[in-house]
Image (cartoon, grey):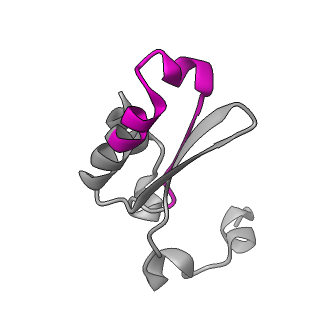
């Protein structure tokens, strides 16, 4: 489940970077004990190459990829505002 959600959280445009999954703690706790879920998230994140970390905030269990993206991903060729303007 976690691995599938991680894969769905990234876009091709970002080349797999900036992954982020947030799930309600109640939903996650049904899968098992929190330390085991955190370990599972680290293992699942390792498959697509994430540097995974997890934390809890405001009732959410959050899994993030903290890798530093390549310059190509950080600095797109055109500013976002310019890409969204009609031609």
The residue drawn where x is 45% and y is 62% is: 17
Q: Is residue 43 above or below residue 40?
A: below
Of the 4 image quadrants, the one containing the C terminus is bottom right
Left or right of residue 85, residue 53 in this image = left
Residue 18 rendering spot, x and y as whole percentages = 51, 60
Q: Nearer the viewer, residue 29 or 22?
A: 29
> Start and end of the magenta stretch?
18-39
The residue drawn where x is 37% and y is 34% is: 36
Using the rendered view, name the quadrant where residue 75 is placed: bottom right
Q: Residue furthest top?
A: 30
Q: Is residue 36 above or below residue 80?
A: above
Left or right of residue 44, residue 51 in this image = right
**Residue 12 in view, yes or no:** yes
Q: Nearer the viewer, residue 3 or 10?
A: 3
**Residue 76 in view, yes or no:** no
Q: Nearer the viewer, residue 80 or 47?
A: 47
């Amino acid at each position: 489940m976690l691995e599938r959600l991680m894969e769905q959280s990234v876009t091709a445009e970002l080349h797999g970077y900036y992954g982020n999954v947030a799930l309600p703690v109640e939903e996650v706790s049904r899968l098992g004990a929190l330390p085991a879920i955190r370990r599972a998230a680290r293992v699942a994140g390792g498959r697509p190459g994430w540097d995974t970390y997890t934390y809890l905030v405001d009732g959410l269990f959050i899994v993030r990829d903290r890798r530093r993206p390549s310059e190509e991903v950080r600095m797109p060729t055109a500013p976002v505002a310019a890409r969204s303007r009609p031609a």
